[in-house]
Image (cartoon, rainbow, N blue to C red):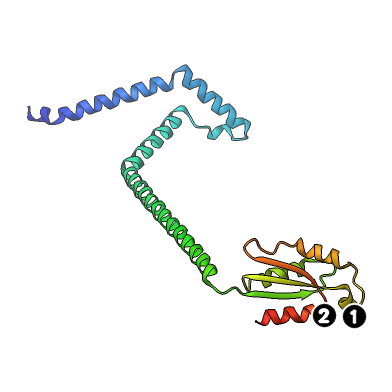
């Protein structure tokens, strides 16, 4: 009696296993599975695999079962770990985004303060006049870059354009006349934040402008 009670559960488990094996064998012998295996064998033959190594229906079922068991074990053993890691990463990304947003706001605030300080300094500071002169015959990028650099040194840029007579005495007759060179210089937009003054000048006017620039 005690022996029967001890072995009864194992007999029941064996019966369940026998029933599962019988059902699996019946399913593998079904026409649907047979046709699928035949299609697989035809494909393997088409790609040049010898028929001697073609898997049987039992082998395919065993491979499928091993794959399912492996995936299930992986999910049970490591699925929660990966999910917790993903949650931690998502939380870290959220905190990083909030931090970036705070830094951007601080940068905007600092930029606004710097702009306000610059405007206040310009309003209270003593004007600085920058003088430069030249023939500016056949205007090119070098002339415009000189205007830009000169305007960056002060609050007001004064540009003197030498007259035809002074250029002829120093370098020879210019290609462009006074009005053409004045128009070319006036068309150069130095900066919208500074005052650019342009005027024609001879040697006497040049001395006057130089004295103004030193004052």
Quarter of the image with the C terminus is bottom right
Of all residues shown, which one is farthest toward the top? 31
Residue found farthest to the left: 1
Q: Nearer the viewer, mark 2 or mark 1?
A: 2
Instruction: Left or right? Give the position of 47 relative to 187.
Output: left
The mark tally for this picture is 2
Residue 203 is tagged as: 2
Query: Toward the viewer: 118 or 37?
Result: 118
- The relative height of residue 105 versus residue 6 in the rendered view (above or below) is below
Query: Is the Cβ of the residue at disc 2 closer than 8 Å to that at disc 1?
Result: yes
Residue 83: x, y in percent? 34, 44
Badge 1 density bin: few <14, some 14–19, many ≥20, Cα 10 Å: few
- As rendered, which of 8 and 110 lies closer to the eye? 110
Q: Horizontal and vertical percent for residue 47? A: 62, 34
User: Which quadrant of the figure contains the N terminus?
Assistant: top left
Q: Is residue 106 left or right of residue 130?
A: left
Report how far apart the C-alphas of labels 2 and 1 lie in the structure.
10 Å
Label ID, residue 169: 1
Residue 136, by quadrant, is: bottom right
**Residue 9 screen position, x and y as percent:** 17, 29
Labelled disc at residue 159: none
Q: Is residue 96 left or right of residue 16?
A: right
- Foreground of the two, 178 or 205: 205
Query: Going 54% across and 73% down the picture, which residue do you hit?
Result: 125
Q: Secondary structure at mark 2?
A: helix
Asked if 133 appears above or below 73 in the picture, the reply is below
Q: Quadrant of residue 149?
A: bottom right
Which residue extends farthest right? 173
Tell me if residue 58 comes above or below residue 197 in the rendering: above
The residue under the point 78% across, 65% down is 185
- The residue at the point 76 percent across, 82 percent down is 207
Looking at the image, is mark 2 or mark 1 earlier in the sequence? Answer: 1
């Amino acid at each position: 009696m005690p022996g029967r009670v001890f072995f009864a559960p194992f007999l029941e488990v064996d019966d369940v296993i026998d029933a599962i094996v019988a059902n699996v064998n019946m399913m593998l012998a079904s026409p649907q599975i047979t046709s699928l295996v035949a299609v697989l064998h035809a494909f393997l033959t088409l790609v040049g695999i010898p028929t001697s190594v073609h898997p049987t229906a039992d082998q395919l079922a065993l491979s499928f079962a091993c794959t399912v068991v492996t995936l299930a074990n992986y999910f049970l053993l490591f699925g929660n770990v990966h999910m917790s890691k993903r949650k931690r990463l998502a939380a870290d990304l959220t905190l990083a985004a909030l931090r970036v947003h705070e830094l951007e706001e601080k940068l905007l605030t600092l930029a606004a303060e710097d702009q306000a300080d610059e405007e206040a300094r310009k309003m209270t500071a003593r004007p600085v006049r920058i003088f430069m002169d030249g023939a500016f015959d056949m205007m090119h990028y070098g002339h415009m870059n000189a205007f830009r650099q000169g305007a960056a040194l002060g609050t007001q840029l004064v540009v003197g354009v030498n007259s035809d007579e002074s250029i002829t005495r120093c370098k020879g007759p210019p290609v462009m006349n006074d009005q053409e060179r004045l128009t070319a210089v006036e068309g150069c937009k130095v900066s919208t934040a500074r005052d650019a003054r342009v005027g024609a000048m001879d040697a006497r006017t040049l001395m006057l402008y130089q004295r103004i620039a030193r004052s």
